[in-house]
Amino acid sequence: MTLLAESAGAALRLLLEGNRYVLETVLLSLRVSGLALLLGTAIGLPVGAALGMTRFRGRSLLVALVHTGFALPPVVVGLFVYMMLSRSGPAGSLEILFTPAAMVIAQAILAAPYIAGISLAAIQAVPVEVRLQALALGASPARAVFTHLREARLGIGAAVVGGFGAVISEVGAVMMVGGNIAGETRVMTTAIMLETRRGNFATAMALGIILLLLAFLVNAILTAAQQGRGAVAAAGRRAW
Amino acid sequence: MLLPAFSAAHDGVHVRLIAVGSGQAMALGRRRDADVLLVHAPEAEHAFMAGGHGRARLPVMYGDYVIVGPTADPAVVNRAADAADALRRIVLANALFVSRGDDSGTHHRELELWRAAGWPDPPAPPNRIEAGQGMGETLMMASEREGYTLTDRATWLALADVLSLTLLLDGDARLTNPYSVITVAGAANEAGADLLAAWLTSDEAARLIVGFGSEASGHRVFTAGAPPAAAGP
């Protein structure tokens, strides 16, 4: 118990004094996972939109594949990216194994199916009449698709935010393809593992607290999106 | 390898093995989360004993470290006079050294070698990076990045086939790697700890220790007892 209390106290001190190691680790995490999220959204959202707005033979197979991607184990993605980027692998000449770029690729692969799957569900839930009506009112096809996407914006937002929560707390893939190199590829999750192994509980806890705060933030946004603004407004009316 | 034989000989003592680096092992000992430690970081062990955290410290066996690196050997480490000279050559050639960076016994020894080579604080990137991982991962990283690293011979022999690295330097007295067993002061099970420590330093354990290397790789990796020159401070 004393260990826990002492470490928690020391962790808070590290946070309050803005410890450089902690700050740099957090910033690299945000940079890597942020870029991975952009890349994952750029791939996942068009896939989700295409599958959510169309009906064709083989579609359900593709949807099943996207949902399988939900359960992609980070270590398997890490293994795959490692083998691709290894000196003896097909993309070895890029020489980006054990760099932040490799970590971005691995996390984007993890984020893309998540974003595709959740946004697919949101887009599918929008009545198709919304798009038909827009077309009937003289909108161009692109404009109609945009209208459809706008109706699903809360769900798409939830997909992106949830994808961020998934990749920032992931450790298996970044450890394998980043290598946890001090000052180069060490992010919050890999640093927590190392510092715990070294017995530096205060540093590990300081990073853990920030990771928890980020997770809380992500879930608060997700909850707000799920309840919808309507629910919030209704709650406000009840309060009146 | 040793534990099953000990358990077979001592019915009443149940050993739970936690495999961690020597630094964390001693951190566990300081918090009395472990009863017995098998460690290989002589300097840190002396500090541990001086701090009153251990009851007894006995030599169990010793192996050695080797310096490995890319086959092309741009820093010409294979002509180095000793381990300290090898490290100097790596930095002078602007080559890369991959450190464990994880507070393990190997990491401690590497820092001692840098001090001997003239770096009270080890060099910074890009000449030296800290992997913060185990020996296997560090060797893989050195292989991928065409860098040098310090490794214990047993891990090197186990992985040499899958690495594009070559053994470049061994045989320096500074590369002796002695393992000690430490019984923790104020441990929960002192009697069991004493039994295990006594058995690890017994003739029976010695036979198993010597047999291990020859069995695994055809090379002898460990020798029982303390190294001849009683290495370490």
Image (cartoon, grey):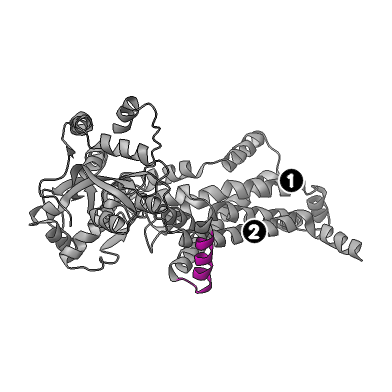
Percent coordinates x, y for residue A104 in the rendering: 47, 55
Numbered label attached to residue A216: 2
Amino acid type of disc 2? Phe
- The prevailing secondary structure element of the residues shown in magenta is helix
Left/right placement of residue B124 relative to residue A59 reads left
Image vertical order of residue A150 relative to residue A23, above or below:
above
Quadrant housing the N terminus of chain A: bottom right
Residue drawn 54% across and 67% down?
A12
Q: Secondary structure at mark 1?
A: helix
State the residue at coordinates (26%, 37%). Answer: B198
Q: Earlier in the sequence, mark 2 or mark 1?
A: 1
Q: Nearer the viewer, residue B189 or B121?
A: B189
The stretch drawn in magenta includes residue A13: yes
Q: Position of residue A202 (x, y in %)?
A: 48, 62
* Left-right relation of A41 to B204: right
On the question of residue B34 being in view, the answer is yes
Residue B96 seen by the camera? no
Q: Position of residue B205 (x, y in %)?
A: 23, 32
Question: Can residue A57 be found in the magenta stretch?
Answer: no
- Name the residue carrying label 1: A124
Residue B74 on image: x %, y %: 16, 57
